Image (spheres, rainbow, N blue to C red):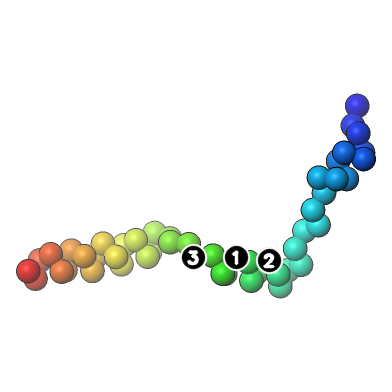
Amino acid sequence: MINFEEELKKFHPSLEVEDAEEAIYNQDLTDMADLMVKIVKESKKTNVE
């Protein structure tokens, strides 16, 4: 059976849209486009030397 008192202790309210947006954008996440740019730059350095 569900113990509602215990479940309420675990509850954390969700972020407001603005707060969630800020939290997401403040994370430094590398995506595939960033990786490809890095690889191309590194390969250009290697080919020049």
Instruction: Name the spot of residue 5 as percent of width and height, x first.
Output: 92, 40
Q: Earlier in the sequence, mark 3 or mark 2?
A: 2
User: Left of 12 or right of it: where is 41?
Assistant: left
Residue located at (23% from left, 69% from top): 41
Instruction: Name the spot of residue 20 as percent of width and height, x first.
Output: 68, 66
> Where is 31 relative to 1, above or below?
below
Please state which amino acid type lies under the numbered disc 3: Asp
- Residue 36, labelled with which disc? none
Residue at which label 3 appears:
28
Residue at which label 1 appears:
24
Residue at which label 2 appears:
20
Please state which amino acid type lies under the numbered disc 1: Ile
User: Left of 31 or right of it: where is 5?
Assistant: right
Q: Decide: marks 1, 2 in contact (CB < 8 A)?
A: yes
Q: CA distance from mark 3 to mark 2?
A: 15 Å
Instruction: Please tell me how crowded label 1 is: few (under 14), some (14-19), or many (20+) other residues with Cα within 10 Å.
Output: few
